[in-house]
Image (cartoon, coloured by chain):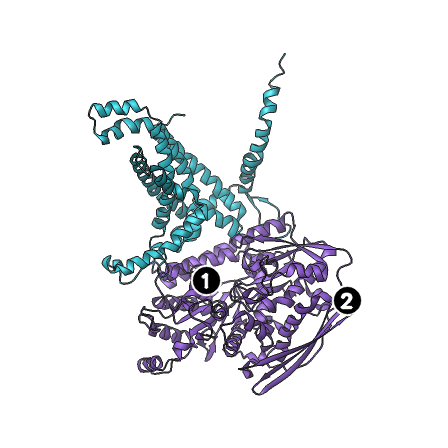
Amino acid sequence: MRGPKSPYLIFILPSLIILSAIIIFPFAFNLYLSFHKWDIRFRGAVPEFIGVANYLKAFSDARFFNSLSKTLYMLSLAVPLEFFFGLLLALLFYEPFKGRRLLSIFILFPLALSDAVVGLVWGLTLVPTYGPVDYFMRIFGLWEALGFKKPISLVMTYPMEMIILADIWQWTPFFYIVLLAGLASLPREIIEAAEIDGAAKLNIVRYIMMPMLKQVIGVVLIIRITDIFKTFGLAYVMTKGGPGFASEVVSLYIFNQALQFLNITYAAALTMILIIVITIVINVFIRGYRLRF
Amino acid sequence: MGKKLDNFPGFNKRVSRREALSTAGKVAIGAVVAGVVAGVGGYYAGSLTAAPAATVTETRTVTAAATTVRETVTATVTAPATTATVTKTVTVGAPPTAPVTITLACDAGHNYLPWFDPKEAPEGGHYGQNQAPKIKEVLGIDIVGEEVDPGTEFSIYMADLTGPGKYNIIVYFPTYNGDILGGGWAVPLDEYIEKYRINLDDLPPVYRYLYCSWGGKTYALPYDGDFHALYYRKDIFANTDIRKKFRDKYGRDLEPPKTYDEYLQVAEFFTGWDWDGDGEEEYGTVEDFKDLTWGIFFDRFASLGGLWFDEEMNPLAPNDAAVKALEDLVKITEYMPPGFLEFGALEVFDCMTKGITAMTLTWPDVGPRAGSGEFPVKGDQVGTALVPGYVVGGKLLRYSWTGVGRVMMITVNTPEEKREAAFRVLKWMWDTSVYWVPSGLNGEDPFAYSHTSPGALPHWKRANPAWSEEGILDYMRAAAENFAHGYPDLYLPGAAHYTDILSRYIMMAVRGEISPRDAISRTVEEWRSVTKDLGEEKQKTLWKQQIVEYKRAGIWPK
């Protein structure tokens, strides 16, 4: 006779323990902190229950809303452009040609770099006086041609756009490789049949490939949408959220509150709000996109 | 400003005296103690104003007994009109009877090297590092070190102090003094300072009272000094044609600027033409906007008599002076190279040592970096001077912001029986600091008069082969002058939050998004809100404790 559920419980117990330790406990502790005030900088300070005060403070915190708007701006530009360029590359590399493998390695290279490295590379590339972009702009007289009296700092003048540019450079290969794998898995005979029937290339992409890739595209988009909310390294390294508050994305703001200003409990409340925002955005996307799992 | 260097301890002293620091030891100390003595000897012997060219000789006798190391060093300083001899005897105490392990946390990178440097090179820019093995050998104290990311060290230290308490010694930026000292996390050191006869007179007031003290007690010893200095291209400023051109244009001689109005004028003069003949257009000056924006603002604001808070906790008082300081900061940006807003400390240093700007107002590193000879602009091509100032109430007030730096403290989590051993480690690092501060390549900067006195000259010469003796002494004089005119960073709980807000609004004003007045009024408003969040009464009490230190340092307005 089999014991009631016991073998199953034993098998999943290690996973449950690990999940509790790394997900459930931190989440529960974060939730607990968000309802308290705890100034850990003073010896002997203990958490003091303050109800929803941290949440109310967040709703009147202009800097928090500014950081959310910067993140949504990034989301609206970076993800569609990464998808567009990734798809374009995937279609270009769909048909075999000489050197495809080698070129793929080059395309995938940025994906192997950390955010901090990418931020540093772009920061150093774009910085006037020292960087190569300014060097070539000067040599070819492009600053003057573009109407600038003297070289400008692209990162300081267009901070969010430069962060988005770096993000596109880093993450387009992700769309490329996943979409290419998706294309490779499509039944070849359907596409060949369309070609024999004389369908235009663009129509094959639009009416055959894209519908068949819909689930793959949906999953990739969800991953990148959640990633955008986690953007930290690029903004931290390239601009530190500046100049002023011009590129302070939401994760950077929460980091500042928690680890720079030591407002741990307020940061916990902001984190909870961010989780809710992400959940809403993802749900809206899933419903709008009609993604099925 | 009215403050004269002669009024500060350590200047113009010509004395001989002996100090015994403890009573037992072993022979291995040798060269380490000699270096310390040479530095301290220079402090006693040095007359900066009277020693444009000094030669230093050291004679050493070492007496070793079974339990005692005694080393007597005589340093003779000879300079025009100045000859002084100092003899100092240092006795190193016995190792602890039982082996002791002390845990250390220090920010990663170059600041960690004075403790542990696997690539220790006895000569060149890195000599004098890797002290931990020497401490173990001589004092019998084993140091277990941990490198901490400087960007997040505050949260790491606070997490340890409030949690496991595994660190005994922490090396940190004094900007966290409000949280660490004000929060009660450090052991008072006065008793040990007295017992081991640490000569705190060797420190300029801003380091002694603001870096290291809180509410009248000493809690830390400096590890790395920092101050802003004015650097200028000495060779270009001496060029006859350029001098004539300047005189023709402005009707006065070209000199390192003493006021911010002069600074603006000199910067304007050097902007937009090729004054060094390298075929490229150059610029007047550059300052570090990227990392520590509020520091360059405070050079100006403090020199206008400005305060972080007044006694009633009103922010940036008087506000009109803050507006004027910011307006001047905005004006000077016109004469900076493209992209200056993105320049951190290293890019700013490079502007000077690569011949891009004629001046810079920045950290102490520029002089020694030029002195190292590893950059296109070398050694004596760079001159160093006291930062400019403003005439306030008929007096020229010049303050150099001394933010950043590093101090060492013992945590309250350290067991009683380990505290004295931990202090002896601090003392060792304090004593040997004269070895590593002269190099601009390791980022450690002078913080004591002994570091900038002629007695320390051999160390400076060794680390800076491209610098003449005169050039080094010129730098030492200016360095001492700047830290003697030092103005502290904000040391109050929440300092990082206050300065973050200020920096962001400064940047917005510099970019023309808002006016300087608007930037200051928004900063004031948000600072009040931060104070309220942190607890108004608590902040006021802690600020009053800080004012005690300002008064002891002689920089609180009378």
For mark 1, does the 10 Å Cα neighbourhood hold few (<14), some (14 to 19), or many (20 or more) residues? Answer: some
Of all chains in the rendering, the one displayed in cyan is A
**According to the rendering, which colour does chain B have?**
purple
The residue sitting at the bottom extreme is: B81
Looking at the rendered structure, the number of numbered marks drawn on it comes to: 2
Residue extending furthest toward the front: A98
Q: Position of residue B402 (x, y in %)?
A: 52, 67
Kind of residue at disc 1: Ala
Q: Is residue B341 left or right of residue B368?
A: left
Which amino acid type is marked by label 2? Answer: Ala
Q: Mark 2 falls within which chain?
A: B
- Judge by depth and name the residue closer to the eye, A39 or A234: A234
Separation of residues labelled 1 and 2 (CA atoms): 44 Å
Give the residue at mark 1: B345
Element at label 2: loop
A161 relative to A285, above or below:
below
Q: Residue at x 58, y 35 (%)?
A: A21
Q: Are marks 1 and 2 on the same chain?
A: yes
Callout in the foreground (1, 2): 2
Residue A63 appears anywhere in the view: no
Task: State the residue lying farthest toward the right.
Answer: B66
Residue B24: mark in rendering = 2
Looking at the figure, which quarter contains the C terminus of chain A?
Answer: top left
Quadrant of res B102 = bottom right
